[in-house]
Amino acid sequence: MKLNQNLLADIFQDGMVFPRNKDFKVGGYIEPKQKVEVSFNQHTYFAMSDENGKWEIILPAVNEDLVQELTVKSNNKTQTISNLKFGRVYLLGGQSNIEYRLKDEKHYQGIVSKLKEMKYSNFYYYNVPQVDYLDPKTGEVRPKDLQVEHWHHINENNAGMVSAIGFYMMLALQESGIQEPIAVVDCFKGGTSASVWIKEADLARDADLKDAFLDKYHETIAGKSWEDFDRETKAYNLTVEKHNRDLAKYLKMHPDTSLSTAKNIVGHTPWPPPYRPDLYTRPSGLNETMLKQIEFGVFNQMVWYQGENDTDRAKYYDKLLPLLIHTWRQTLHDPSLPVKLIQLPGYADYPDNSGAEIRQTQLVVSRTVPQVDLVSFIDGGEEHNIHPTNKGTMGMRLGKIMAGDDYAGTPYVEKMDASSEGTKFRFVFKIARCQKLHLEKETYLKVKYFDKKVEQIKLNADNLQNNKLILELDDLPKEISYAYENYPHHIGLYNELNYPLSPFRVGFIKKVM
Protein backbone atom coordinates (compact mmCIF):
# COMPACT_ATOMS: atom_id res chain seq x y z
CA MET A 1 0.00 0.00 0.00
CA LYS A 2 1.07 3.63 -0.42
CA LEU A 3 -0.16 7.13 0.32
CA ASN A 4 1.05 8.68 -2.94
CA GLN A 5 0.68 7.88 -6.64
CA ASN A 6 4.38 7.63 -7.45
CA LEU A 7 6.03 4.78 -9.33
CA LEU A 8 8.06 3.90 -6.25
CA ALA A 9 6.75 2.88 -2.83
CA ASP A 10 6.53 5.72 -0.31
CA ILE A 11 9.77 4.84 1.48
CA PHE A 12 11.79 5.66 -1.66
CA GLN A 13 12.31 9.41 -1.44
CA ASP A 14 14.98 12.08 -1.67
CA GLY A 15 17.60 11.74 1.04
CA MET A 16 17.01 8.02 1.54
CA VAL A 17 19.73 5.86 3.07
CA PHE A 18 20.38 2.41 1.55
CA PRO A 19 22.59 -0.30 3.08
CA ARG A 20 26.18 -0.18 1.91
CA ASN A 21 27.84 -3.39 0.65
CA LYS A 22 24.51 -5.22 0.38
CA ASP A 23 22.30 -5.83 -2.65
CA PHE A 24 19.15 -3.75 -2.31
CA LYS A 25 15.72 -3.44 -3.88
CA VAL A 26 13.52 -0.76 -5.33
CA GLY A 27 9.88 -1.36 -6.14
CA GLY A 28 6.31 -0.25 -5.89
CA TYR A 29 2.79 -0.64 -7.26
CA ILE A 30 1.59 0.65 -10.64
CA GLU A 31 -0.83 -0.57 -13.30
CA PRO A 32 -0.65 -4.34 -13.94
CA LYS A 33 1.56 -5.73 -16.69
CA GLN A 34 3.52 -2.53 -17.28
CA LYS A 35 7.20 -2.28 -18.20
CA VAL A 36 9.45 -0.51 -15.68
CA GLU A 37 12.86 0.96 -16.42
CA VAL A 38 15.30 1.87 -13.63
CA SER A 39 18.45 3.91 -14.25
CA PHE A 40 21.08 3.76 -11.53
CA ASN A 41 24.84 4.08 -11.31
CA GLN A 42 25.26 4.26 -15.11
CA HIS A 43 23.26 1.07 -15.67
CA THR A 44 19.69 0.42 -16.77
CA TYR A 45 17.48 -2.34 -15.37
CA PHE A 46 14.05 -3.58 -16.49
CA ALA A 47 11.06 -5.27 -14.86
CA MET A 48 7.35 -5.93 -15.47
CA SER A 49 4.61 -5.30 -12.95
CA ASP A 50 2.58 -8.39 -12.10
CA GLU A 51 -1.19 -8.89 -12.20
CA ASN A 52 -1.51 -6.86 -8.98
CA GLY A 53 0.72 -4.07 -10.25
CA LYS A 54 3.65 -4.99 -8.02
CA TRP A 55 7.16 -4.63 -9.40
CA GLU A 56 10.65 -4.77 -7.94
CA ILE A 57 14.25 -4.83 -9.08
CA ILE A 58 17.28 -5.99 -7.11
CA LEU A 59 20.26 -3.68 -7.58
CA PRO A 60 23.90 -4.60 -6.93
CA ALA A 61 25.61 -3.50 -3.75
CA VAL A 62 27.24 -0.08 -3.55
CA ASN A 63 30.40 0.24 -1.48
CA GLU A 64 30.74 4.01 -1.44
CA ASP A 65 28.61 7.10 -1.14
CA LEU A 66 29.08 8.58 -4.61
CA VAL A 67 25.85 7.54 -6.36
CA GLN A 68 23.31 10.30 -5.84
CA GLU A 69 20.31 9.57 -8.07
CA LEU A 70 17.94 6.82 -9.16
CA THR A 71 15.34 7.25 -11.91
CA VAL A 72 12.28 5.13 -12.65
CA LYS A 73 10.21 5.30 -15.84
CA SER A 74 6.96 3.55 -16.72
CA ASN A 75 3.99 4.30 -18.96
CA ASN A 76 5.11 7.87 -19.73
CA LYS A 77 5.75 8.65 -16.07
CA THR A 78 9.15 9.42 -14.53
CA GLN A 79 10.25 9.60 -10.91
CA THR A 80 13.73 10.53 -9.74
CA ILE A 81 14.97 10.32 -6.17
CA SER A 82 18.18 12.17 -5.36
CA ASN A 83 20.65 12.95 -2.58
CA LEU A 84 20.87 9.23 -1.85
CA LYS A 85 23.15 7.89 0.87
CA PHE A 86 24.72 4.48 1.47
CA GLY A 87 25.57 3.37 4.97
CA ARG A 88 23.96 1.32 7.73
CA VAL A 89 20.18 0.97 7.92
CA TYR A 90 18.37 -0.54 10.89
CA LEU A 91 14.71 -1.50 11.17
CA LEU A 92 13.11 -0.75 14.54
CA GLY A 93 9.85 -2.54 15.35
CA GLY A 94 7.57 -3.08 18.31
CA GLN A 95 5.36 -1.02 20.59
CA SER A 96 5.48 2.03 22.84
CA ASN A 97 8.92 1.78 24.44
CA ILE A 98 10.71 1.63 21.08
CA GLU A 99 8.25 4.25 19.78
CA TYR A 100 9.05 6.55 22.73
CA ARG A 101 10.20 9.77 21.05
CA LEU A 102 13.45 11.56 21.76
CA LYS A 103 11.52 14.76 22.57
CA ASP A 104 10.05 13.00 25.62
CA GLU A 105 13.33 11.49 26.79
CA LYS A 106 15.06 12.60 29.96
CA HIS A 107 18.14 14.09 28.27
CA TYR A 108 16.51 15.64 25.20
CA GLN A 109 17.55 19.25 25.82
CA GLY A 110 21.18 18.25 26.15
CA ILE A 111 20.95 16.35 22.88
CA VAL A 112 19.46 19.41 21.15
CA SER A 113 22.39 21.53 22.31
CA LYS A 114 24.85 19.07 20.81
CA LEU A 115 22.86 18.89 17.58
CA LYS A 116 23.17 22.66 17.27
CA GLU A 117 26.93 22.17 17.45
CA MET A 118 26.70 19.59 14.61
CA LYS A 119 27.92 16.80 16.90
CA TYR A 120 25.70 14.19 15.24
CA SER A 121 25.67 15.13 11.58
CA ASN A 122 25.43 11.68 10.00
CA PHE A 123 22.17 10.34 11.47
CA TYR A 124 18.95 9.79 9.50
CA TYR A 125 15.47 8.42 10.14
CA TYR A 126 12.22 7.54 8.42
CA ASN A 127 8.98 7.03 10.35
CA VAL A 128 6.62 4.59 8.64
CA PRO A 129 3.17 6.28 8.55
CA GLN A 130 0.94 4.76 11.22
CA VAL A 131 -1.95 3.67 9.03
CA ASP A 132 -4.65 2.09 11.20
CA TYR A 133 -6.94 0.91 8.42
CA LEU A 134 -7.22 0.77 4.65
CA ASP A 135 -10.79 0.46 3.40
CA PRO A 136 -10.76 -2.43 0.90
CA LYS A 137 -13.64 -0.94 -1.10
CA THR A 138 -12.80 2.76 -1.27
CA GLY A 139 -9.06 2.74 -0.61
CA GLU A 140 -9.63 5.33 2.13
CA VAL A 141 -6.89 5.48 4.74
CA ARG A 142 -7.50 6.06 8.45
CA PRO A 143 -6.61 8.28 10.19
CA LYS A 144 -7.87 10.51 7.40
CA ASP A 145 -5.35 13.30 8.05
CA LEU A 146 -2.31 11.02 7.71
CA GLN A 147 0.47 12.52 5.60
CA VAL A 148 3.22 11.00 3.47
CA GLU A 149 6.38 10.74 5.54
CA HIS A 150 9.86 11.87 4.46
CA TRP A 151 13.44 10.92 5.18
CA HIS A 152 14.98 13.18 7.82
CA HIS A 153 18.61 14.17 8.20
CA ILE A 154 18.66 14.60 11.96
CA ASN A 155 19.10 18.13 13.30
CA GLU A 156 17.89 20.13 16.30
CA ASN A 157 14.55 20.84 14.59
CA ASN A 158 13.47 17.31 13.71
CA ALA A 159 15.30 15.04 16.17
CA GLY A 160 12.39 15.02 18.59
CA MET A 161 10.35 12.61 16.49
CA VAL A 162 12.93 9.85 16.15
CA SER A 163 12.82 6.83 18.46
CA ALA A 164 14.84 7.69 21.59
CA ILE A 165 16.25 4.16 21.74
CA GLY A 166 17.08 4.45 18.04
CA PHE A 167 18.89 7.75 18.48
CA TYR A 168 21.10 6.51 21.31
CA MET A 169 21.76 3.32 19.36
CA MET A 170 23.03 5.44 16.44
CA LEU A 171 25.14 7.50 18.84
CA ALA A 172 26.82 4.37 20.21
CA LEU A 173 27.43 3.09 16.68
CA GLN A 174 29.11 6.39 15.78
CA GLU A 175 31.22 6.30 18.95
CA SER A 176 32.34 2.79 18.03
CA GLY A 177 34.08 4.29 15.00
CA ILE A 178 31.46 3.93 12.26
CA GLN A 179 31.80 6.95 9.99
CA GLU A 180 29.30 6.12 7.25
CA PRO A 181 25.68 7.37 7.37
CA ILE A 182 23.54 5.62 10.00
CA ALA A 183 19.77 5.42 9.61
CA VAL A 184 16.77 3.93 11.39
CA VAL A 185 13.43 3.05 9.84
CA ASP A 186 10.79 3.24 12.57
CA CYS A 187 7.94 0.74 12.12
CA PHE A 188 6.14 0.62 15.45
CA LYS A 189 2.98 1.57 17.31
CA GLY A 190 2.15 1.58 21.00
CA GLY A 191 -0.35 -0.75 22.59
CA THR A 192 0.16 -3.59 20.13
CA SER A 193 0.25 -7.34 20.59
CA ALA A 194 2.68 -9.31 18.46
CA SER A 195 -0.44 -10.74 16.78
CA VAL A 196 -1.10 -7.32 15.22
CA TRP A 197 2.14 -7.58 13.22
CA ILE A 198 1.76 -11.17 11.94
CA LYS A 199 0.11 -12.27 8.70
CA GLU A 200 -3.43 -13.53 9.15
CA ALA A 201 -2.61 -16.71 7.22
CA ASP A 202 0.28 -17.42 9.58
CA LEU A 203 -1.90 -16.95 12.66
CA ALA A 204 -4.58 -19.17 11.14
CA ARG A 205 -2.17 -22.06 10.65
CA ASP A 206 -1.72 -22.50 14.40
CA ALA A 207 -4.86 -23.79 16.14
CA ASP A 208 -4.11 -22.08 19.46
CA LEU A 209 -3.33 -18.70 17.90
CA LYS A 210 -6.32 -18.94 15.58
CA ASP A 211 -8.61 -19.61 18.53
CA ALA A 212 -7.10 -17.00 20.86
CA PHE A 213 -6.77 -14.14 18.38
CA LEU A 214 -8.53 -14.57 15.03
CA ASP A 215 -11.63 -16.47 16.14
CA LYS A 216 -12.10 -14.26 19.17
CA TYR A 217 -11.89 -11.15 16.99
CA HIS A 218 -14.32 -12.39 14.34
CA GLU A 219 -16.79 -13.65 16.95
CA THR A 220 -16.69 -10.26 18.68
CA ILE A 221 -17.46 -8.18 15.58
CA ALA A 222 -19.91 -10.62 13.95
CA GLY A 223 -23.32 -9.13 13.13
CA LYS A 224 -22.46 -5.60 14.26
CA SER A 225 -22.96 -2.42 12.27
CA TRP A 226 -20.68 0.62 12.18
CA GLU A 227 -23.21 2.32 14.47
CA ASP A 228 -22.69 -0.52 16.97
CA PHE A 229 -18.92 -0.11 16.79
CA ASP A 230 -19.17 3.66 17.29
CA ARG A 231 -21.46 3.22 20.29
CA GLU A 232 -19.08 0.72 21.91
CA THR A 233 -16.08 2.97 21.26
CA LYS A 234 -17.86 5.97 22.77
CA ALA A 235 -18.74 3.97 25.89
CA TYR A 236 -15.13 2.79 26.18
CA ASN A 237 -13.77 6.33 25.88
CA LEU A 238 -16.13 7.50 28.63
CA THR A 239 -14.93 4.64 30.84
CA VAL A 240 -11.30 5.65 30.30
CA GLU A 241 -12.07 9.29 31.08
CA LYS A 242 -13.85 8.30 34.31
CA HIS A 243 -10.94 6.05 35.31
CA ASN A 244 -8.45 8.86 34.75
CA ARG A 245 -10.54 11.25 36.86
CA ASP A 246 -10.92 8.69 39.65
CA LEU A 247 -7.21 7.90 39.67
CA ALA A 248 -6.22 11.58 39.75
CA LYS A 249 -8.70 12.22 42.57
CA TYR A 250 -7.40 9.29 44.63
CA LEU A 251 -3.77 10.32 44.22
CA LYS A 252 -4.63 13.88 45.22
CA MET A 253 -6.38 12.62 48.36
CA HIS A 254 -3.57 10.15 49.16
CA PRO A 255 -0.33 11.88 48.06
CA ASP A 256 1.89 9.34 49.83
CA THR A 257 0.34 6.37 48.03
CA SER A 258 2.35 4.76 45.23
CA LEU A 259 0.89 4.70 41.74
CA SER A 260 0.82 0.91 41.87
CA THR A 261 -1.21 0.87 45.09
CA ALA A 262 -3.58 3.48 43.71
CA LYS A 263 -4.11 1.44 40.56
CA ASN A 264 -4.81 -1.67 42.63
CA ILE A 265 -7.55 0.26 44.45
CA VAL A 266 -8.99 2.38 41.64
CA GLY A 267 -8.20 -0.08 38.87
CA HIS A 268 -5.81 -0.08 35.94
CA THR A 269 -6.45 1.89 32.77
CA PRO A 270 -9.08 0.02 30.72
CA TRP A 271 -7.38 -1.68 27.77
CA PRO A 272 -7.77 -2.73 25.01
CA PRO A 273 -10.55 -0.79 23.29
CA PRO A 274 -13.48 -2.84 21.94
CA TYR A 275 -12.72 -4.59 18.67
CA ARG A 276 -13.83 -2.98 15.42
CA PRO A 277 -12.67 -3.59 11.83
CA ASP A 278 -10.74 -0.30 11.63
CA LEU A 279 -9.01 -0.63 14.99
CA TYR A 280 -5.24 -1.03 14.68
CA THR A 281 -5.12 -3.57 17.51
CA ARG A 282 -7.09 -6.13 15.49
CA PRO A 283 -5.14 -9.32 14.63
CA SER A 284 -2.85 -8.78 11.61
CA GLY A 285 -3.99 -5.16 11.34
CA LEU A 286 -0.62 -3.39 11.20
CA ASN A 287 0.96 -6.20 9.23
CA GLU A 288 -1.40 -5.15 6.45
CA THR A 289 -1.12 -1.38 6.85
CA MET A 290 2.39 -0.65 8.17
CA LEU A 291 4.73 -3.57 7.52
CA LYS A 292 3.37 -3.69 3.97
CA GLN A 293 4.73 -0.18 3.41
CA ILE A 294 8.34 -1.34 3.80
CA GLU A 295 8.14 -4.67 1.97
CA PHE A 296 10.77 -3.45 -0.52
CA GLY A 297 13.15 -2.28 2.21
CA VAL A 298 16.57 -3.82 2.81
CA PHE A 299 18.19 -3.57 6.24
CA ASN A 300 21.44 -4.43 7.96
CA GLN A 301 19.70 -5.55 11.15
CA MET A 302 16.32 -5.46 12.85
CA VAL A 303 15.48 -4.56 16.45
CA TRP A 304 12.29 -5.91 18.03
CA TYR A 305 11.15 -4.37 21.34
CA GLN A 306 7.68 -5.58 22.32
CA GLY A 307 5.84 -7.87 24.68
CA GLU A 308 4.24 -5.55 27.22
CA ASN A 309 0.88 -5.87 25.51
CA ASP A 310 1.03 -9.66 25.46
CA THR A 311 1.48 -10.07 29.21
CA ASP A 312 -2.25 -10.74 29.59
CA ARG A 313 -1.85 -13.73 27.25
CA ALA A 314 1.75 -14.64 27.97
CA LYS A 315 1.17 -18.35 27.42
CA TYR A 316 0.89 -17.72 23.67
CA TYR A 317 4.08 -15.68 23.34
CA ASP A 318 6.30 -18.71 22.72
CA LYS A 319 4.35 -19.16 19.48
CA LEU A 320 3.78 -15.51 18.62
CA LEU A 321 7.38 -14.32 18.85
CA PRO A 322 9.11 -16.81 16.51
CA LEU A 323 6.17 -16.51 14.12
CA LEU A 324 6.56 -12.74 14.08
CA ILE A 325 10.26 -12.98 13.25
CA HIS A 326 9.42 -15.44 10.46
CA THR A 327 6.69 -13.15 9.10
CA TRP A 328 8.90 -10.07 9.00
CA ARG A 329 11.81 -11.88 7.40
CA GLN A 330 9.46 -13.40 4.85
CA THR A 331 7.86 -10.05 4.03
CA LEU A 332 11.30 -8.48 3.57
CA HIS A 333 12.59 -11.49 1.56
CA ASP A 334 15.55 -11.74 3.93
CA PRO A 335 15.37 -15.11 5.77
CA SER A 336 18.65 -14.54 7.61
CA LEU A 337 18.07 -10.91 8.62
CA PRO A 338 19.85 -10.49 12.00
CA VAL A 339 17.45 -9.61 14.80
CA LYS A 340 18.27 -8.03 18.14
CA LEU A 341 15.53 -9.01 20.56
CA ILE A 342 15.06 -6.59 23.46
CA GLN A 343 14.28 -8.29 26.75
CA LEU A 344 11.67 -6.33 28.68
CA PRO A 345 12.80 -4.12 31.56
CA GLY A 346 11.31 -4.52 35.00
CA TYR A 347 7.79 -3.24 35.68
CA ALA A 348 5.75 -4.25 38.71
CA ASP A 349 2.19 -3.95 37.46
CA TYR A 350 1.98 -6.75 34.91
CA PRO A 351 -0.60 -9.42 35.83
CA ASP A 352 0.76 -12.26 37.97
CA ASN A 353 4.34 -13.04 36.89
CA SER A 354 3.66 -12.54 33.19
CA GLY A 355 6.49 -10.06 32.65
CA ALA A 356 8.95 -12.72 33.83
CA GLU A 357 7.26 -15.29 31.58
CA ILE A 358 7.62 -13.02 28.54
CA ARG A 359 11.33 -12.49 29.31
CA GLN A 360 11.89 -16.23 29.60
CA THR A 361 10.27 -16.70 26.19
CA GLN A 362 12.46 -13.97 24.72
CA LEU A 363 15.52 -15.77 26.08
CA VAL A 364 14.43 -19.13 24.65
CA VAL A 365 13.61 -17.66 21.23
CA SER A 366 17.00 -15.94 21.07
CA ARG A 367 18.63 -19.33 21.63
CA THR A 368 16.50 -21.38 19.25
CA VAL A 369 15.81 -19.12 16.25
CA PRO A 370 18.87 -18.56 14.02
CA GLN A 371 20.40 -15.10 13.79
CA VAL A 372 18.46 -13.81 16.81
CA ASP A 373 20.35 -12.32 19.76
CA LEU A 374 19.03 -11.19 23.12
CA VAL A 375 19.79 -7.72 24.46
CA SER A 376 18.50 -7.53 28.02
CA PHE A 377 17.08 -4.28 29.37
CA ILE A 378 16.13 -5.97 32.66
CA ASP A 379 17.98 -3.31 34.68
CA GLY A 380 16.43 -0.38 32.81
CA GLY A 381 12.91 -0.36 34.21
CA GLU A 382 10.97 1.77 36.66
CA GLU A 383 8.83 -0.08 39.18
CA HIS A 384 5.51 1.61 38.39
CA ASN A 385 6.24 3.35 35.09
CA ILE A 386 5.91 1.14 32.04
CA HIS A 387 7.63 3.84 29.95
CA PRO A 388 10.99 4.66 31.60
CA THR A 389 12.11 8.16 30.61
CA ASN A 390 15.84 7.39 30.57
CA LYS A 391 16.42 5.60 27.26
CA GLY A 392 20.09 6.58 27.03
CA THR A 393 21.69 3.70 28.90
CA MET A 394 19.60 1.09 27.11
CA GLY A 395 20.01 2.63 23.65
CA MET A 396 23.77 2.96 24.09
CA ARG A 397 23.99 -0.67 25.22
CA LEU A 398 22.07 -1.77 22.14
CA GLY A 399 24.29 0.29 19.83
CA LYS A 400 27.52 -1.01 21.34
CA ILE A 401 26.35 -4.56 20.80
CA MET A 402 25.14 -3.86 17.25
CA ALA A 403 28.51 -2.37 16.36
CA GLY A 404 29.81 -5.94 16.46
CA ASP A 405 33.04 -5.25 18.33
CA ASP A 406 32.36 -7.63 21.22
CA TYR A 407 29.51 -9.99 22.12
CA ALA A 408 26.48 -10.40 19.84
CA GLY A 409 24.17 -9.94 22.83
CA THR A 410 23.97 -9.88 26.60
CA PRO A 411 24.96 -12.86 28.79
CA TYR A 412 22.68 -15.79 29.57
CA VAL A 413 22.84 -19.24 31.15
CA GLU A 414 24.08 -21.53 28.41
CA LYS A 415 24.37 -24.76 30.37
CA MET A 416 23.82 -26.14 33.84
CA ASP A 417 25.66 -29.09 35.40
CA ALA A 418 24.21 -30.74 38.49
CA SER A 419 25.97 -33.19 40.79
CA SER A 420 25.69 -34.53 44.31
CA GLU A 421 28.22 -35.57 46.91
CA GLY A 422 27.07 -36.88 50.23
CA THR A 423 24.22 -34.67 51.38
CA LYS A 424 25.21 -31.73 49.17
CA PHE A 425 23.79 -30.80 45.79
CA ARG A 426 26.01 -28.70 43.54
CA PHE A 427 24.83 -26.67 40.55
CA VAL A 428 27.17 -24.97 38.10
CA PHE A 429 25.64 -22.50 35.65
CA LYS A 430 27.88 -21.72 32.68
CA ILE A 431 27.32 -18.21 31.39
CA ALA A 432 27.60 -17.49 27.66
CA ARG A 433 28.92 -14.13 26.43
CA CYS A 434 30.92 -13.70 29.58
CA GLN A 435 34.51 -14.18 30.67
CA LYS A 436 34.23 -12.72 34.15
CA LEU A 437 30.94 -12.64 36.02
CA HIS A 438 30.77 -10.11 38.83
CA LEU A 439 28.36 -8.64 41.37
CA GLU A 440 27.34 -5.00 41.09
CA LYS A 441 25.15 -5.01 44.19
CA GLU A 442 23.33 -7.26 46.64
CA THR A 443 21.93 -10.16 44.64
CA TYR A 444 19.87 -13.25 45.41
CA LEU A 445 18.87 -16.53 43.83
CA LYS A 446 15.41 -17.83 44.65
CA VAL A 447 15.17 -21.53 45.45
CA LYS A 448 11.90 -23.45 45.74
CA TYR A 449 11.86 -26.92 47.29
CA PHE A 450 9.52 -29.84 46.84
CA ASP A 451 8.15 -29.32 50.37
CA LYS A 452 7.03 -25.82 49.23
CA LYS A 453 9.74 -24.09 51.24
CA VAL A 454 11.20 -21.02 49.50
CA GLU A 455 14.68 -19.69 50.20
CA GLN A 456 16.40 -16.48 49.08
CA ILE A 457 20.13 -17.16 48.82
CA LYS A 458 22.43 -14.15 48.87
CA LEU A 459 25.32 -14.44 46.44
CA ASN A 460 28.91 -13.52 47.18
CA ALA A 461 32.29 -13.82 45.49
CA ASP A 462 32.51 -17.52 46.40
CA ASN A 463 29.55 -18.22 44.11
CA LEU A 464 31.38 -16.79 41.08
CA GLN A 465 34.22 -18.35 39.15
CA ASN A 466 35.13 -16.69 35.85
CA ASN A 467 32.06 -17.32 33.67
CA LYS A 468 30.37 -19.69 36.11
CA LEU A 469 27.72 -19.23 38.77
CA ILE A 470 28.00 -21.91 41.47
CA LEU A 471 25.41 -22.88 44.04
CA GLU A 472 25.51 -25.58 46.74
CA LEU A 473 22.36 -26.72 48.54
CA ASP A 474 21.53 -29.19 51.29
CA ASP A 475 18.32 -30.36 49.60
CA LEU A 476 17.29 -31.05 46.02
CA PRO A 477 15.41 -27.99 44.74
CA LYS A 478 12.28 -27.95 42.67
CA GLU A 479 13.29 -24.69 41.00
CA ILE A 480 16.18 -22.21 40.93
CA SER A 481 15.57 -18.76 39.51
CA TYR A 482 17.28 -15.41 39.16
CA ALA A 483 15.29 -12.16 38.80
CA TYR A 484 12.26 -14.15 37.68
CA GLU A 485 9.57 -11.64 38.67
CA ASN A 486 7.83 -8.68 37.09
CA TYR A 487 10.08 -6.12 38.75
CA PRO A 488 13.25 -7.69 40.18
CA HIS A 489 14.75 -5.61 42.99
CA HIS A 490 18.11 -7.38 43.07
CA ILE A 491 19.65 -7.20 39.58
CA GLY A 492 23.34 -7.53 40.29
CA LEU A 493 24.98 -10.10 38.00
CA TYR A 494 26.95 -8.58 35.11
CA ASN A 495 29.67 -9.64 32.71
CA GLU A 496 32.99 -7.83 32.30
CA LEU A 497 31.39 -5.32 29.90
CA ASN A 498 28.67 -4.50 32.44
CA TYR A 499 25.94 -6.19 30.44
CA PRO A 500 23.34 -7.76 32.78
CA LEU A 501 22.79 -11.48 32.99
CA SER A 502 19.39 -12.45 31.61
CA PRO A 503 16.89 -13.58 34.23
CA PHE A 504 16.35 -17.32 34.20
CA ARG A 505 14.35 -20.11 35.79
CA VAL A 506 15.38 -23.78 35.90
CA GLY A 507 13.09 -26.56 37.11
CA PHE A 508 13.96 -30.04 38.40
CA ILE A 509 12.18 -33.35 38.80
CA LYS A 510 12.44 -35.29 42.02
CA LYS A 511 14.72 -38.25 41.48
CA VAL A 512 17.99 -39.64 42.77
CA MET A 513 20.91 -37.80 41.15
Image (cartoon, grey):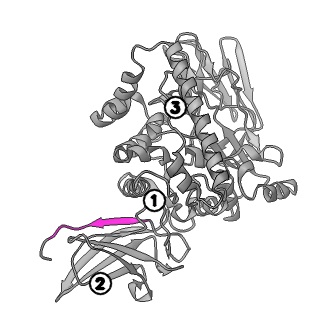
Q: Position of residue 497 (x, y in %)?
A: 56, 74
What's drawn in magenta, residue-wise?
503-510
Residue depicted at x 44% and y 44%: 310
Of callouts 2 and 3, the N-terminal one: 3
Q: Residues within 10 Å of mark 3 (few under 14, many from 20)?
A: some
Residue sitting nearer the eye, 290 or 219: 219
Q: Amino acid type of disc 1?
A: Asn
In the rendered structure, the answer to whether residue 453 lies left or right of residue 178 reads left
Q: Position of residue 144 (x, y in %)?
A: 67, 20
Q: CA distance from mark 2 to mark 3?
A: 50 Å
**Residue behind mark 2:** 472
Residue sitting nearer the eye, 18 or 406: 406
Q: Quadrant of the C terminus?
A: bottom left
The residue at the far right in this view is 117
**Residue behind mark 1:** 486
The residue at the far front in this view is 253
Q: Position of residue 164 (x, y in %)?
A: 67, 51
Residue depicted at x 30% and y 66%: 506
**Residue behind mark 3:** 273
Q: Residues within 10 Å of mark 2 (few under 14, many from 20)?
A: some
Q: CA distance from mark 1 to mark 2?
A: 26 Å
Q: Position of residue 190 (x, y in %)?
A: 57, 40
